[in-house]
Image (tube, rainbow, N blue to C red):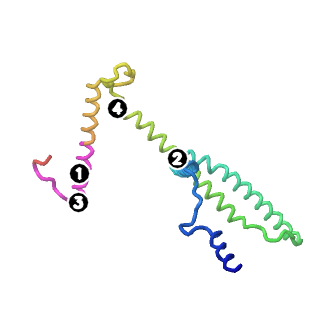
Amino acid sequence: MAAPQQQQQAPSQAPPPGPPLTLQAGPGPQPQLQTQAAAQAQAQAQAAAQAQAQDFDPVQRYKMLIPQLKESLQNLMKIAAQNLVQNTNIDNGQKSNDGVVQRFDKSLEEFYALCDQLELCLRLAYECLSQSFDSTKHSPNLVPTATKPDAVQTESLPYTQYLSMIKSQISCAKDIHNALLECSNKITGKIPAQGGP
């Protein structure tokens, strides 16, 4: 009879049937994790945008390439010195124990590639600067708005002068268009229709 009593006591000690109990985290930590993940994603997006902006900005690209150029020049001089020492030892009939020396032409090629990239960056920066100067020189000045009469600048044009400048620019563009059209007709041998625009 002792055995049935033990069997009856064993089921009472087992956990009740049903879905297993799981520990759930409270509502506090989950929003923190979400905000941290969102902040990390935003930081990554900003870093990617900044890197992309640096790729398009020739001045930033130039600043990034200068340390690489210095390192490449130091490496080039070191390899040139090693090759010079090795060639001198070979000319004097001595064997060099330095082992394999790096190739000078590869390091020189790397140096020239960085110089070419720097030259392209400088040319692009110069083009951007000259285009900015031309834009400020040839574009019309601001027209004062009626909503902000206090903010009128001294270099702003009155509306009548602005209109005359725009009309002259339109007539100049039409003249260029007509000249190009006439030139293309002469090249192709077409005769323009009489009474055309």
Which of the pair 59/50 is nearer the observer? Answer: 50
User: Could you say where residue 108 lies in the image, as x and y percent from the top left?
Assistant: 68, 61
According to the picture, the residue beneath numbered tag 1 turns out to be 181
The residue under label 3 is 188
Q: For the residue carrying disc 2, how many other residues have a C-alpha within 10 Å: few (<14), some (14-19), or many (20+)?
A: some
Q: In this view, does 89 lie above or below 188?
A: below
Q: Position of residue 46 (x, y in %)?
A: 53, 48
Question: Given this view, does label 4 or label 2 mark the residue nearer the observer?
Answer: 2
Provide residue 144's location: percent of width, then percent of height.
33, 24
Quick one: SS at disc 4?
A: loop
Q: Residues within 10 Å of mark 1 (few under 14, many from 20)?
A: few
Mark 2 / mark 1, whichever is N-terminal: 2
Per the image, the residue denoted by label 2 is 57
Instruction: Name which residue lies at 37% across and 35% down.
Output: 138
At label 3, which amino acid type do we have? Answer: Thr
Residue 7 visible: yes
Asked whether residue 119 is in view, the answer is no
Three-letter residue code for mark 2: Asp
